[in-house]
Image (cartoon, rainbow, N blue to C red):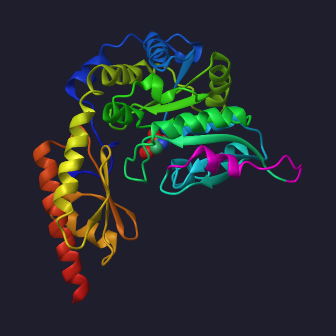
Amino acid sequence: MIDVRSDTVTRPTPGMRAAMASAPLGDDVFGEDPTVNALEARVAGVFGREAALFVTSGTMGNQLAIACQTSPGDEVLVGEHAHPVHYEVAAASALSGVQIGVLGAGGTFTADDLEAAVRPPAYYQPRTRLVCVENTHNRAGGRLFPQTAVREITARARALGLASHLDGARVWNAHVATNISLRDLAEGFDTISVCFSKGLGAPVGSALVGSRALVERARRFRKMWGGGMRQSGVLAAAAMYALDHHVARLAEDHEHARAFAAIVAGSPDACVNEADTNIVNVDVVRVPADRVAAQARELGLAIHASDTHRLRAVFHLDVSADAAREAAHVLVAAIRAAVAEARV
Ligand SMILES: Cc1ncc(COP(=O)(O)O)c(C=O)c1O
């Protein structure tokens, strides 16, 4: 089975497993795990910040950023189809008591969109407090957020008295696709969340990056939410290994996504987005996406039906160039079969 449902499905490589097995460990709730401490220092340094906190997931990274920079009754502004809107179980309202407002279209937005959405200081309105940028954007098909817009947004947020957060679950892909340094991609944001468990191939783990004071506040929430971990150096070692070995190779995933998209675009019944990075959205207007996914599975391809008429393919280190091309041909056949089935 070729599995392009997500870049989270990767298994640790033998090298990564060896790094995990030999990692020096301690109790991280006591701050004594040397591997976690080394990872946190390294990630803070990569982004030019004071501190980082190793956390269980990208969801926890985003939610800690929200909890640390808002109060109940505040509003958080995000791009259309941002991860916290679709896939974080309304955690922003449940855990932080905030409301989410959506800006722009297709995942990106401008500084003017932001300014227009900021609410006046009337006591009966939510207080606009935080803006989040998702780069790359998952539901928009791995879309890159234009860097000029990012700079204007963070500057405008500061001028308007708002905090800003980068959901950088796949900021590594943005870095490799654009050649812009990680530090520059994160410049101007108060907090950054990154994931090691997506394209980087680690089994578990994300980080929240920011000022020392904010990270210490986040550490309290992490414990409160049950995310304090003990010998989590076994996981941090996988993340370290991924930073050493799996960043530059993301370019291969981007190439595989482009090759896949070019083949699928040949189907008369598919409409494919431009593959900026490692994600390809395939719209199948004439048939339900879940029927196509079911047909594909019978032919040996696991692909995610991300909407009624949309499939999502995500490329990662367990999908070779040949497998990516094979996946495209299987998908084209599955679409054809689903269309024929719908005609009967
Ligand atoms: C953009 C983005 N942010 C955050 C997350 C959350 O990561 P996790 O699944 O580790 O909670 C994801 C997961 O796919 C994501 O795509």
Please tell me whether residue 116 belongs to the stretch shown in magenta.
yes
- Left or right, residue 281 beside residue 30: left
Q: In this view, does 300 lie above or below 324?
A: below
Q: Position of residue 112 (x, y in %)?
A: 63, 47
Stretch of the chain drawn in magenta:
108-124
Residue farthest right in this picture: 123
Q: Residue shown at 32%/25% (left/top)?
A: 242
Please tell me whether residue 341 belongs to the stretch shown in magenta.
no
Q: Is residue 39 above or below residue 328?
A: above
Q: Residue shown at 28%/39% (left/top)?
A: 10
Q: Return the residue nearer the eye: 93 or 47.
A: 47
Residue farthest bottom in this picture: 344
Q: Position of residue 16 (x, y in %)?
A: 27, 24
Q: Residue shown at 46%/19% (left/top)?
A: 43
Quarter of the image where the C terminus is located: bottom left
Residue 223, quarter of the rendered image: top right
